[in-house]
Image (cartoon, rainbow, N blue to C red):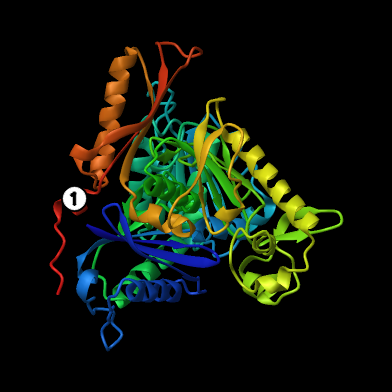
C-alpha cells in the first residue's frame, strides 16, 4: 500500500513515497508563501525521483490523473507548522467570541484572563458567561440558561463575529450543555463556526477553554490551508484521500481537521519522532530532531511520543490538551556561532542559510560551517571554512555535544540506558556516544523523517474521564471501550487497535472512590487496510 507523506515547514517542504516498510523516494524543497506551490513542487520532484509522471487537467481544474505508480497511492498525509506559527507570530487569526457555561460558579476569572495582550488584541471577539455546567459527578450546577445563549448568539451576529469557542464546567464528563448551546447558536447565527471544548481539551476549565479559543481563532486559516492542500494534490493528478497529522502522531481526515487546527500544533516534531521509530524499527527510545533553528528532544513510548501531563504554553497561552512532551533548545544547522568568546545561538540565519553561511559564500559563521570544517558533513564549498582554527571547531563541537547531552538527560525519566535516534537535517551534530544512552542511531532518510512519520501515521481515540465507585480493572475496561469507539468513529480499523498510553489517578479529595483515567488507543486507517492498490497503467 503506497502512501505519500508531506511535511510543510516554515523553511522546507519534505515529501516521501512509502510502500510497506520501504521508502521508495524522498525529496526536500523550499516552502512557498502560498503553500500550494511548495507542495506541488515537492510532488513533482518526488515523481521524478521515483520515475513517474504526474499530470493535471489542461484547463487547470486539477482533475488529471497520475500515471504508473501514482495511481497506486492510497493516501496522502500532510503535517504542517502553519497553525502554531500563526499563533506565535500573531498573524492570520480571525476574531472569535468566548461562551462559558458556568454561572453561578467560575465567574471570578473571565476568559483570556492571563493571555498576552498583543494576542488578545488581534483575536478577542468578546465573552459571554451564562448559567449552566455540571459538577464533577455529573450533577447540574444550575439549569442551562437557553435564552441567554440565544441572546449571546444574536449579539455575536450583530458584531460580525463568525467563530465562537464554547466551554462548560466539567464538559469532558458530559458535553450536554455544550451540545445544546451549539444547537441554539446555530439557530440564531447559522454562519457561526463553533468549537466545543469537550471535543478538544482535558479536565481543567481555564486551560481547556484556552485551547478551545485558540482553535476558534484559527478556524478561517485552517479552512484556507486545507483547501490549498487539497487543491495542490488534485492539481498533481492524485485522487487519493487527504489526512492531516496531529500532535500525538496520528491522523484525521481533512474534513475533521478543518475544524481542529490546534491538534496539529506540534505535528512537525511528532512526525519526526514517529518517522524515527519507523525507520529504526525501535519503539522505546530517546529522539533528537535537529533542524535548522532548534533541536527537539523527546521520548518514544510504544512507538509514539510521550505525552505531556502538565500545562503546555502555546504562544504564551496556557493549554491542556493532547501535546507531546518535548524540550526545544536553540541549536540547529542554521544556528549562528560567535567566537572569542564562544557563543552558540540562539540566533539563526534560518532560510537564509544558503546565502549567508560561509560555505555558501556568505559572511556569517553557522553550525553548518562548523560541521563542514569538522568533516561531519559535505555541503557547500569546504575551502571557504579551511581558515577556521582547529581549536574553535573542536570547542564548538564539544559545546554542541554538551548542550544535546544535557537536553537528553533532562527528558529521561530514569537512569536506565536507552537508544537515541538522531534525525533531522542537523543530525550530524549529535555525538556518537552519550551518558545514559546505549547507542546513538542515525536512521536512513533521517533528514526527511518528519515526512516519513506523516506517511505512517495511524488513527487514535482518547478518553480523559472521572469514574466513581468502580474497581480499577473495570474502569480501565470501560475507558478502553470508550477510546476504541472514538477511534472507530474516526475511521480506524477495529482489528488493528492497541492501547499505547494508560494512566489512572485516584482523587482522594473527592467522595465516591473517584478515579481519573486517561487512556489512548491507536490503529490503522480502515479504508487503507480494506482497499487494494489499483493496478499500474
Q: What is the count of numbered marks? A: 1
Tell me residue 117's x, y (percent): 68, 52
Q: Is residue 388 left or right of residue 195?
A: right
User: Which residue position holds label 1?
Assistant: 529
Q: Is residue 388 left or right of residue 272?
A: right
Q: Quadrant of the C terminus?
A: bottom left
Neighbourhood count class around disc 1 (C-alpha, 10 Å): few under 14, some 14–19, many 20 upward: few
**For numbered disc 1, what is the local secondary structure?**
helix
Tell me residue 527's x, y (percent): 19, 53
The residue sitting at 33% across, 51% down in the picture is 456
Which quadrant of the figure has residue 255? Answer: bottom left
Residue 486, compared with residue 266, is above or below; it is: above
Which quadrant of the figure has residue 383? Answer: bottom right
Q: Nearer the viewer, residue 120 or 58?
A: 58
Residue 342, compared with residue 414, is above or below; it is: below
Q: Quadrant of the N terminus?
A: bottom left
Q: Nearer the viewer, residue 506 or 5?
A: 5
Q: Nearer the viewer, residue 381 or 337?
A: 381
Q: Is residue 172 left or right of residue 341?
A: left
The residue sitting at 55% across, 67% down in the picture is 11
Residue, far right:
340
The residue sitting at 36% across, 16% down in the picture is 468
Residue, far bottom:
58
Q: Nearer the viewer, residue 127 or 495?
A: 495
Which quadrant of the figure has residue 6? Answer: bottom left
Tell me residue 85's x, y (percent): 56, 59
Q: Is residue 3 left or right of residue 358?
A: left
Is there any visible trace of residue 155 in the rendered image? Answer: no
Is there any visible trace of residue 248 in the rendered image? Answer: yes
Tell me residue 187's x, y (percent): 33, 53
Amino acid at each position: 500500500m503506497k502512501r505519500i507523506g508531506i511535511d510543510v515547514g516554515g523553511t522546507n517542504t519534505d515529501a516521501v513515497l512509502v510502500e510497506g516498510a520501504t521508502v521508495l523516494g524522498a525529496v526536500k524543497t523550499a516552502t512557498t508563501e502560498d503553500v500550494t506551490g511548495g507542495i506541488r513542487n515537492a510532488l513533482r520532484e518526488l515523481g521524478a525521483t521515483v520515475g513517474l509522471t504526474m499530470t493535471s487537467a489542461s484547463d487547470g481544474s486539477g482533475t488529471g490523473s497520475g500515471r504508473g505508480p501514482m495511481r497506486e497511492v492510497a493516501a496522502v498525509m500532510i503535517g504542517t507548522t502553519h497553525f502554531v506559527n500563526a499563533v506565535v507570530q500573531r498573524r492570520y487569526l480571525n476574531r472569535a467570541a468566548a461562551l462559558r457555561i458556568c454561572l453561578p460558579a467560575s465567574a471570578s476569572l473571565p476568559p483570556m484572563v492571563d493571555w498576552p495582550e498583543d494576542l488578545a488584541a488581534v483575536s478577542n471577539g468578546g465573552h459571554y458567561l451564562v448559567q449552566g455546567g455540571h459538577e464533577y459527578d455529573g450533577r447540574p450546577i444550575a439549569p442551562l440558561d437557553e435564552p441567554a445563549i440565544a441572546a449571546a448568539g444574536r449579539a455575536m451576529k450583530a458584531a460580525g463575529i463568525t467563530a465562537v469557542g464554547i466551554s462548560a464546567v466539567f464538559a469532558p464528563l458530559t458535553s450536554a450543555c455544550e451540545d445544546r448551546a451549539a444547537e441554539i447558536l446555530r439557530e440564531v447565527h447559522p454562519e457561526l463556526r463553533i468549537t466545543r471544548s469537550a471535543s478538544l481539551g482535558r479536565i481543567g476549565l481555564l486551560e481547556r477553554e484556552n485551547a478551545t479559543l485558540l482553535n476558534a481563532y484559527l478556524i478561517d486559516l485552517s479552512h484556507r490551508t486545507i483547501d490549498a492542500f487539497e487543491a495542490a494534490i488534485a492539481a498533481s493528478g492524485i485522487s487519493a484521500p487527504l489526512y492531516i497529522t496531529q500532535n500525538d502522531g496520528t491522523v484525521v481526515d481533512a474534513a475533521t481537521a478543518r475544524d481542529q487546527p490546534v491538534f496539529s500544533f506540534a505535528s512537525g516534531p511528532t512526525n519526526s519522532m514517529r518517522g524515527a521509530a519507523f525507520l529504526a524499527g525501535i519503539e522505546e527510545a530517546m529522539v533528537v530532531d535537529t533542524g535548522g533553528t532548534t533541536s527537539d528532544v523527546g521520548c518514544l513510548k510504544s512507538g509514539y511520543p510521550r505525552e505531556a501531563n502538565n500545562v503546555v504554553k502555546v504562544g504564551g497561552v496556557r493549554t491542556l490538551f493532547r501535546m507531546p512532551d518535548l524540550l526545544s533548545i536553540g541549536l540547529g544547522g542554521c544556528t549562528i556561532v560567535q567566537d572569542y568568546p564562544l557563543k552558540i545561538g540562539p540566533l539563526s540565519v534560518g532560510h537564509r542559510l544558503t546565502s549567508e553561511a560561509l560555505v555558501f559564500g556568505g559572511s556569517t559563521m553557522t553550525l553548518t560551517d562548523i560541521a563542514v570544517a569538522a568533516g561531519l558533513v559535505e555541503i557547500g564549498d569546504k575551502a571557504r571554512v579551511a581558515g577556521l582554527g582547529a581549536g574553535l571547531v573542536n570547542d564548538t563541537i564539544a559545546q554542541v555535544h554538551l548542550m544535546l547531552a544535557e537536553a537528553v538527560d533532562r527528558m529521561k525519566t530514569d537512569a536506565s540506558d536507552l537508544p537515541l535516534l538522531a534525525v533531522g537535517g542537523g543530525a550530524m551534530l549529535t555525538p556518537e556516544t552519550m551518558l545514559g544512552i546505549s547507542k546513538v542511531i542515525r536512521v536512513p532518510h533521517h533528514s526527511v523523517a518528519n515526512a516519513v512519520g506523516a506517511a505512517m501515521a495511524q488513527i487514535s481515540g482518547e478518553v480523559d474521564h472521572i469514574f466513581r465507585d468502580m474497581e480499577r480493572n473495570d474502569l480501565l475496561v470501560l475507558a478502553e471501550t470508550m477510546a476504541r469507539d472514538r477511534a472507530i468513529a474516526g475511521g480506524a480499523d477495529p482489528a488493528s487497535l492497541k492501547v499505547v498510553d494508560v494512566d489512572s489517578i485516584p482523587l482522594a479529595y473527592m467522595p465516591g472512590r473517584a478515579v481519573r483515567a486517561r487512556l489512548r488507543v491507536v490503529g490503522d486507517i480502515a479504508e487503507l487496510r480494506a482497499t487494494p492498490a489499483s493496478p499500474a497503467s
